[in-house]
């Protein structure tokens, strides 16, 4: 059976760090590169971190039914998972790993059902989340305020995931996610 692993969390919770860790530990996993209409942040690279496309291109792909799931997170700021990306990874005999926002994670779990392990990465507190976002240095104060407000809402969806990993200590969170993945993929 083809499988997928879904990591979702409020921005700044550490999900991308945990996904990168799991990709190093498990050669069986392959990262699903999402599409987005937002601009690259920091050192992000097209076709490695995201497929960066215009809102018009994104809407065209929606019309073509090219997505497993997609979300308009903010006005004209779309994120989505291409069906072709998932098929490519499965054709390589690998397990797909997703790094997606909370609504995307819920949609992916509904779509893949028992083929999916969905993990919600929870920050230890909203205050710690704000500290992490500020220390990143990639967003201005208004963007951070918006992300914190969104995080407070996203935390209410945690119970819709198969499991919750509280990332208060990164080493413990790494071990916990490794254990969950080993059990799920049967190694």
Image (cartoon, grey):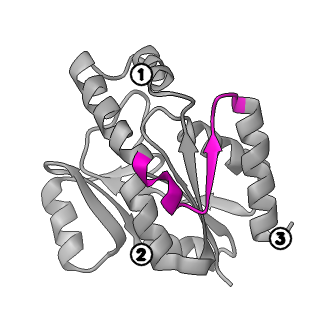
Residue appearing at x 40%, y 68% in the figure: 107
Answer with left or right where residue 45 lies relative to residue 92: left
Callout 3: SS: loop
Q: Which numbered disc flags the more N-terminal residue, 2 or 3?
A: 2
Q: Nearer the viewer, mark 1 or mark 3?
A: 1
The one of 175 and 43 positioned closer to us in this rendering: 175
Mark 2 packing: few (<14 Cα in 10 Å), some, or many (20+)?
few
Callout 1: SS: helix
Question: Where 174 sits versus 129, above or below?
Answer: below
Answer with left or right where residue 95 lies relative to residue 56: right
Question: Where 124 sits versus 99, above or below?
Answer: above
Residue appearing at x 45%, y 77% in the figure: 111
Callout 2: SS: helix
Residue appearing at x 54%, y 60% in the figure: 161
Answer with left or right where residue 5 lies relative to residue 145: right
Image quarter where the C terminus lies is: bottom right
Tag shown at residue 130: 1
Q: Are marks 2 and 1 in contact (CB under 8 Å)?
A: no
Tag shown at residue 72: none
Task: Pinpoint residue 138: horizontal percent, then vertical percent.
Answer: 36, 22
Q: Find the magenta span and give its range.
A: 156-170
Residue 164 is one of the magenta-drawn residues? yes
Task: Pinpoint residue 137: horizontal percent, then vertical percent.
Answer: 39, 16
CA separation in Å, label 2 and label 1 = 34 Å
Residue closest to the far bottom: 1
Residue appearing at x 48%, y 45% in the figure: 9
The residue at which mark 3 appears reads as 186
Tag shown at residue 83: 2
């Amino acid at each position: 059976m083809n499988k997928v692993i879904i990591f979702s969390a409020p921005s700044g919770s550490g999900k991308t760090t945990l996904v990168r860790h799991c990709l190093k530990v498990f050669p069986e996993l392959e990262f699903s590169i999402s599409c987005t209409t937002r601009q690259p942040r920091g050192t992000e690279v097209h076709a490695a971190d995201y497929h960066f496309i215009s809102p018009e291109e994104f809407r065209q792909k929606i019309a073509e039914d090219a997505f497993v799931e997609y979300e308009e997170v903010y006005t004209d700021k779309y994120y989505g998972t291409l069906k072709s990306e998932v098929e490519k990874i499965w054709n390589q005999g690998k397990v797909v790993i997703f790094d997606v926002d909370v609504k995307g994670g819920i949609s992916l779990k509904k779509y893949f059902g028992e083929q999916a392990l969905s993990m919600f990465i929870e920050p230890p507190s909203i205050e710690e989340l704000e500290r992490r976002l500020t220390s990143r240095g990639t967003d201005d104060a208004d963007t951070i305020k918006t992300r914190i407000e969104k995080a407070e809402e996203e935390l209410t969806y945690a119970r819709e995931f198969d499991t919750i990993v509280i990332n208060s200590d990164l080493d413990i969170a790494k071990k916990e996610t490794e254990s969950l993945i080993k059990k799920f993929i049967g190694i």
